Amino acid sequence: MWLIILVYAGLVCTLTAVSYALMFRPKCKSLEFTRQASLERGEFDENLLNLDWQEWSFASPYGYALKGQYLQGKKNAPAALFVHGITWSRYGMVKYMRPFIERGWNVAAFDLAGHGASIAPRRFYPSYGFYEKYDIKAGVEALHSLFSDARLYGLFGESLGAASALQYAPLAKEASSRKIDFIVADCSFSSAWEELLEQYREIHIPNFIAWPSAHMTRFFVRLLRGFDLKEASPSKAVMLTDMPIIFAHGMEDSYVPTIMSVQMASARMSNRIGLTDLVLIPGAGHAVGILTDKARWLAAVDSFIDRVFYEEDPMRNSVVCNEYMDEKNK
C-alpha cells in the first residue's frame, strides 16, 4: 500500500516539475536565431529588413527596458503594434507587418520580457499575459508617442502575444490610457489554466494524476511568480471590454486548440459585446495561418478593419462560429 502511495506521489510530483519547467522555464531563442529562422522559413526577405527601421526602447512598469524596432509610414497613416509569441522575438511578427508596410502603415514591434533583446527578471516571464498586458499598455503609450498623428491604432498579437493583447484590452478603457481602436488576435489560448489541462489531455495523462499535478503547478506559480494561473485568462478579459476584436486561428492547430478562439468569439457575439469577428484557416497549424492562406487571412482582417473604421454591424460574422460549432458537434 505504501509503495503504491509513494509511486503515485512520485508521478504527481514529477509531472508537476515537468509542467512548471515547460511553462515557466522555456528556452527563449536569441534575436539573431529568430531573425535567421524566419528568413529561412520564407516569412519575409532581406529587402524588408533593409528598410529604414529604427531602434526603439520603452520602460516596463516593472522596471526593465523593452527593446524593439519601428518603421515610419505615410503621414497620418494608421499605426500598429505587433506582439510575438512565446520563446520567439519581434521577428516573428514581420510576416504580419509586411502587407501593412506595403500600404504605408506605421508599424512597431518589441521583444516581450525575457525574449530577444528585452532582459528582465525571471519571475516576470512568461506569465501568459498576466504581467505582459501591462508591458503592452506601456507599448501602446510609446506607440502614440512615435505616431501621434495616426488616424487609427491597432494591436496585433500571435499566440502568447495575442493572449496578452486580449488581457490588455480592458486596461484600454482606463481614463489614463491612450486608445487602441482594434485587436487582431491570432491563435490565442483562452486561459493559461485551460491550456495546461489541454496539454495533459493531449498526451493522455489520466485525470487522477493530471488534476493534483495541475493544482500543484498552480500553487508553485502563485508562490514563485506571484499570480494565479486562472487569472491569466483572455476569455474573461474579452467579456469585460467592447474593444473591436478579430480572432484568427488555424484549423489544424495542435498546440492551442482552435476551439479556444471560436468559444471566445462566440461568447462575445452571443452577448453582443463589441465588434467581433472570426477567421479560421483550413490546413493551418499553430501561428502559420497568414502563411498558409494569406489571401483568406488578409481579406478577413481587412474587412474587419474597414468595419472598425466605418463602425458597421458588430454581429455580421457570427455565422462562422455557428458553422464551426455545428461541425465540431457532429
Image (cartoon, rainbow, N blue to C red):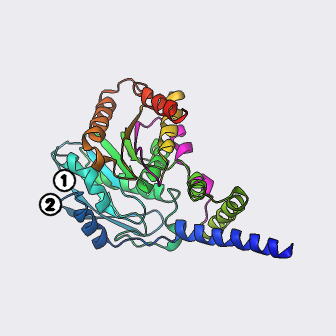
Callout 2: few (<14), some (14-19), or many (20+) C-alpha neighbours within 10 Å? Answer: few
| Snapshot quadrant of residue 83 | bottom left
Residue pictured at 50% horizontal, 73% vertical: 122
Question: Cα distance, mark 2 to mark 1?
Answer: 8 Å
Quadrant of image for the C terminus: top right
Question: Which segment did they paint magenta?
Answer: 226-255
Callout 1: few (<14), some (14-19), or many (20+) C-alpha neighbours within 10 Å? Answer: some
Q: Residue 133, image x and y in percent?
A: 47, 54
The amino acid type of the residue labelled 1 equals Gln
Rendered position, 35 above or below 171: below
Q: Which residue is mark 1?
A: 72
Q: Is residue 99 left or right of residue 7?
A: left
Q: How many marks?
A: 2
Q: Is residue 172 left or right of residue 267?
A: left
Q: Residue 142, image x and y in percent?
A: 33, 56
Q: Is residue 262 left or right of residue 69?
A: right
Which element is circle 2 on?
loop
User: Disc 2 vs disc 1: Cβ atoms closer than 8 Å?
Assistant: yes
Q: Which residue is mark 2?
A: 52
Q: Residue 63, image x and y in percent?
A: 45, 69
The amino acid type of the residue labelled 2 equals Asp
Q: Is residue 287 visible?
A: yes
265 and 275: which one is in front? 265
Rendered position, 157 above or below 49: above
Residue pictured at 20% horizontal, 63% vertical: 54
Residue pictured at 46% horizontal, 29% vertical: 323
Q: Is residue 146 visible?
A: no
Image disc number at residue 138: none
Q: Residue 209, image x and y in percent?
A: 70, 62
